[in-house]
Image: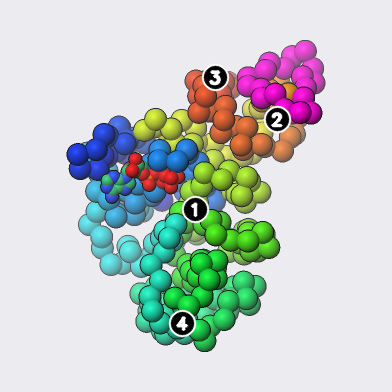
């Protein structure tokens, strides 16, 4: 669905952020785009949806160049920025004004999300708390039922119950027709939600893998289980070494995305090479 081909981009008078970057994302998945502060996650999302134009290379959505900004294409994309623009109008007026731009907008579903998030619809949006504004926009974005849903740091500003609620509604909203991309530097927030992880570092995609494949290839654990396992990365903690190990025996483990992220950004070659080599066998 989303394809970035040989994409190079840098802001005017700034160093190049991406250099010949390739990435392909498909419908039916929730991708977690992970990267350190300032690495370019937001900028990459903007390139994906035609809000930034690549210096060279191409970004396409369903085969169409996104920089053309065709209205029929834009009606299939919803982008929720980290700090969304909140107009000075009631939620009801917002719905009446903005939802017609999204042909698949589902009013009933929106109502259900609103009930879950408990955001009052009669009040002027700018008078709501930041968390309530965010929840309103998340509910709206989900109800638009666009083929591509892109959310930048969606859990920022949400309290703990709302984060749980967010994971619940998003998991239920995704189907085979939709591609969801979430960016975060708070890896643990999206831990149980995403099914594929994309790590952006040093202007390149250092890792792009489904969690199923990841846990087939490597095991997350505290100690070496068998002598066949190799330690790929480890971090000392108060309760022992948290480790990423080779997984020759295919033992299931819960992925620790924070550990994986640290491993990839500290020495991406070890993890990526291992995963790539294994995948080829
Ligand atoms: N409009 C702009 N003009 C010039 N430079 C920009 C602009 N927007 C972002 N940048 C710079 O581009 C780099 C990447 O910014 P970006 O917001 O994409 O990173 P990020 O990974 O999303 O960061 P964070 O996790 O802190 O939100 C930063 O150095 C930032 O200062």
Mark identifier at residue 127: none
Circle 4 crowding by C-alpha within 10 Å: few under 14, some 14–19, many from 20: some
The residue pinned by badge 3 equals: 270
Q: Residue at x 56, y 56 (%)?
A: 155
Q: Are marks 3 and 4 in contact (CB under 8 Å)?
A: no
Q: Residue at x 25, y 43 (%)?
A: 11
Q: Earlier in the sequence, mark 4 or mark 2?
A: 4
Q: CA distance from mark 4 to mark 1?
A: 24 Å
Q: Earlier in the sequence, mark 3 or mark 1?
A: 1
**Marks 4 and 1: which is nearer the front?**
4
Q: Secondary structure at mark 4?
A: loop
Q: Residue at x 55, y 66 (%)?
A: 131
The residue pinned by badge 2 equals: 220
Q: Secondary structure at mark 1?
A: loop
Please report the bounds of the magenta region as a residue range: 219-240
Q: Is residue 128 magenta?
A: no
């Amino acid at each position: 669905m989303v394809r970035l081909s040989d994409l190079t981009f840098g802001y005017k008078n700034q160093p190049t952020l991406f250099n010949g970057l390739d990435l392909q994302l498909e419908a039916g998945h929730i991708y977690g785009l992970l990267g350190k502060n300032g690495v370019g996650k937001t900028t990459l999302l903007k390139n994906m949806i035609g809000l930034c134009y690549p210096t060279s290379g191409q970004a396409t959505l369903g085969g169409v160049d996104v920089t053309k900004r065709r209205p029929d294409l834009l009606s299939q994309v919803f982008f929720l920025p980290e700090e969304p623009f909140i107009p000075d109008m009631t939620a009801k007026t917002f719905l009446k004004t903005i939802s017609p731009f999204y042909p698949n907008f589902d009013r009933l579903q929106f109502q259900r999300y609103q009930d879950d998030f408990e955001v009052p619809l009669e009040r002027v949006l700018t008078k709501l708390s930041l968390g309530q504004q965010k929840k309103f926009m998340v509910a709206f974005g989900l109800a638009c039922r666009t083929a591509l849903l892109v959310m930048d740091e969606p859990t920022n500003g949400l309290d703990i119950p709302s984060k749980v609620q967010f994971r619940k509604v998003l998991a239920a909203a995704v189907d085979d027709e939709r591609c969801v991309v979430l960016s975060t530097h708070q890896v643990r927030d999206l831990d149980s939600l995403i099914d594929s992880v994309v790590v952006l570092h040093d202007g390149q995609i250092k890792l792009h893998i489904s969690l199923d494949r990841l846990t087939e290839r490597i095991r997350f654990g505290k100690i070496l289980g068998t002598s066949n396992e190799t330690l790929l990365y480890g971090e000392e903690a108060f309760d022992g070494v948290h480790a990423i190990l080779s997984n020759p025996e295919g033992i299931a483990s819960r992925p620790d995305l924070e550990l994986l992220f640290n491993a990839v950004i500290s020495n991406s070659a070890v993890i990526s090479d291992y995963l790539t080599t294994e995948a080829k066998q």
